[in-house]
Amino acid sequence: MTYSAPEFLFYEQCASTNDQMKTLLNTEELAENSVVITAHQTTGRGQVGNKWESEANKNLTFSLLLRPGFLAPHLQFYISKCVSLGLVDLLKEHCNDQVSIKWPNDIYVGDKKICGILIENSILGTQLDYCVVGIGLNINQETFKSDAPNPVSLKQICGKTFELDTLLEQLLDHIEQRYHQLEISRFGLIDQYYQENLYRKDGFFDFKDKDGAFKAYIGQVNEMGLLTLIDTEGKKREYAFKEVEFLI
């Protein structure tokens, strides 16, 4: 790997790069933008206990350390927005298909999932101490064996093999650019790009909550990451993550 992170920690195999990063943070002071990466993540985690399948040496599975002490804890979802937008920026450079962010932070190409993000935040007093940003991006994997309904890789989309080191450098650069927008308080710009790149951002689509299925369109995602849907009767419905399901 050639990216000039303050600490670039490579493991041939590990259970979870997020867990490995947090273990390191218990014993040493890692600088912001440090990266823990593995060729084979054996028990990768997604949101709320979901698992992430990744074939060895075929994909990017890593964690990035951010220290956004400038950001109030109640605005921590902006980290998710910036990272998601960095991934969209990268993927739009390499494929012509529709790249979008499925709220809150899955990255889709068309109706298929190419990337999952798991961000774990540590709050110290009234500040965000650090954020561990876990990313699993499907690059060269061609066969998926888990029961995940709609995985896809960049190779399946583009029909060619990609160099992992090069893509990692490009991705970290894109995330850094979006993160800088956050550092200089460009909240409105970040909100605008996030909204413009949302999956199913235009028109009515099928959703399901605890009361059953319904049709709605996306109104907004607020600063705390809550999703507002507006149903066919004009009623506003607000959801936290896992309280509503996109029916695909």
Image: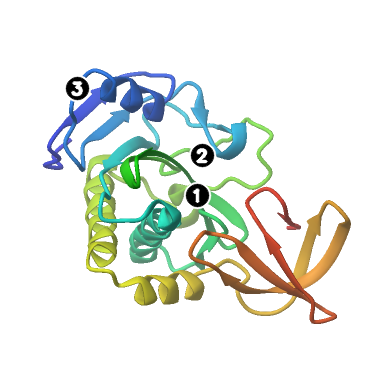
* Quadrant placement of the N terminus: top left
Task: Give the CA separation, mark 3 to mark 2.
Answer: 38 Å
> What is the crowding at mark 1: few (fewer than 14 residues within 10 Å), some, or many (at least 20)?
some
Image quarter of residue 181: bottom left
Considering the numbered disc 1 on the image, is that residue within a helix, a strand or a loop? helix
Q: Amino acid at mark 1?
A: Gln
Residue, disc 2 = 142
Residue sitting at x 81%, y 70%: 215
Furthest residue in direction right, as rendered: 212
The residue at which mark 1 appears reads as 156
- Residue 22's image quarter? top left
* Image quadrant assignment for residue 53: top right
Whether residue 167 sits left or right of residue 47 in the image: it is: left
The circle on residue 245 is: none
Colour logic? rainbow
What secondary structure is marked by label 3? loop
Say if 59 sits above or below 103 in the image.
above
Query: Tags 1 and 2 in contact by the CB under 8 Å rule?
Result: yes
Tell me where residue 221 appears, x and y as whole percent.
56, 67
Measuring from the top left, give residue 60's x and y in whole percent.
36, 38
Residue found 28% across the figure and 48% down from its top? 167
The numbered mark at residue 28 is 3
* Rendered view: 19 above or below 65: above
Q: Nearer the viewer, mark 3 or mark 2?
A: 3
Which of labels 1 and 3 is toward the front?
Answer: 3
The x, y position of residue 78, in whole percent, is 40, 59
C-alpha gap between disc 1 and disc 2: 6 Å
